[in-house]
Amino acid sequence: MNKLTNLKTLAIRAHQGVSFSAEARGENMIKEFGEILDSDLELIKDAGIETKEIYEVRFRKHLTGYMNAKSRIMSPMITGSSNFPVTRMKKLCRYEDSAYKNFNNFRNKALKGIQRQIKRDKPIGADEAWQSIRKSIISSAATIIAIDAGEKGWRRPLFVNSITGLVKRIAKNGQVDHYQKSLALIRELNAKYKKPLIAEKNAIFTLMDVATDAHVEKVEKLNRKNKEFVFDKLGFTVVYNFTEDRLQVLYDTKPDEAVRDMLKKNGFKWAPSNSAWQRFLRRDGVFCLQKMYGINLEDLLNIL
């Protein structure tokens, strides 16, 4: 069964402005990319379930971004040549090319990274990130054990806080697997010594719901559709790119030096790969755009 069937309507819309056979081409697109996704998942079949789920979500997100960009392209063959917006179409074609390039770059980097992770994994399935977490917990635990044995010159709370702070961050980041492994490791160490390293009543042992909710929120954010807001009179488009976590401004023509300097002062950087000025997708970035252009973006703020 094709995993991308639910994107069929979007795939058809992506061809309506450029083809008289939009439905057939859309169906073929779904078939082609469905086979690509199946092939990718086969390449990383030995990865963890969470890793494969996140890869599929991100695959869909990048593909959706490409389809959305493609759906904005029009051909004079379909629309007619009268008053055809040539300049704007050139800009949108660059945006489409960039979206497709982003899709391919994501696949190449993600697949190589996951495959490297699979090769690094030990029989117990501990990935590189977990090894780093484990090393940090054991290092702090060793110092706590030494303090409990009478060694002077160290303050026990500092090293307890080092462990609990790390575990809290893991939970807030939605790293459910790493959170569970961390608690298991701490309990294993606690069982070996008369005085527990970290008492069972500590709040870190009650954060499973926090970790789970954060993981769900992370996946849902990856699955959000990009939002675009066109300001024709000002000559630019504002894009909420959830896939790349970027607030982007795409100009119809190259902005003059004064505008470029203003963008730089407000935290925007030129991204050739996206043909856009961008910064991280945060509310303060939206506030900057409001101030720069004297426009009302309250509707945009409500999305974040």
Image (cartoon, rainbow, N blue to C red):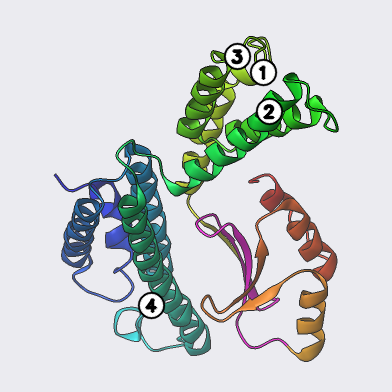
Residue depth check, mark 3 versus mark 4: number of the one nearer the observer: 3
Q: Residue at x 47, y 86 (%)?
A: 90
Amino acid on which the number 2 mark rests in the picture: Thr
Alpha carbon separation for disc pair 3 and 4: 71 Å
Answer few, some or many: residues within 10 Å of disc 4's Cα (few below 14, many 20 plus, some between 14 and 19).
many
Measured Cα–Cα span from mark 1 to mark 4: 63 Å
Answer with mark 3 or mark 4, whichever residue precedes in sequence.
4
Under tag 1, what secondary structure? Answer: loop
Which secondary structure lies at badge 4?
Answer: loop
Q: Which mark is residue 74?
A: 4
Label tally: 4
The residue to which callout 2 is attached is 164
**Type of amino acid under label 4:** Met
Report which residue position mark 3 lands on: 193
Give the residue type that dot 1 points to.
Answer: Ile
The reply to whether residue 88 is in sight is yes
Does 236 appear in magenta? Answer: yes
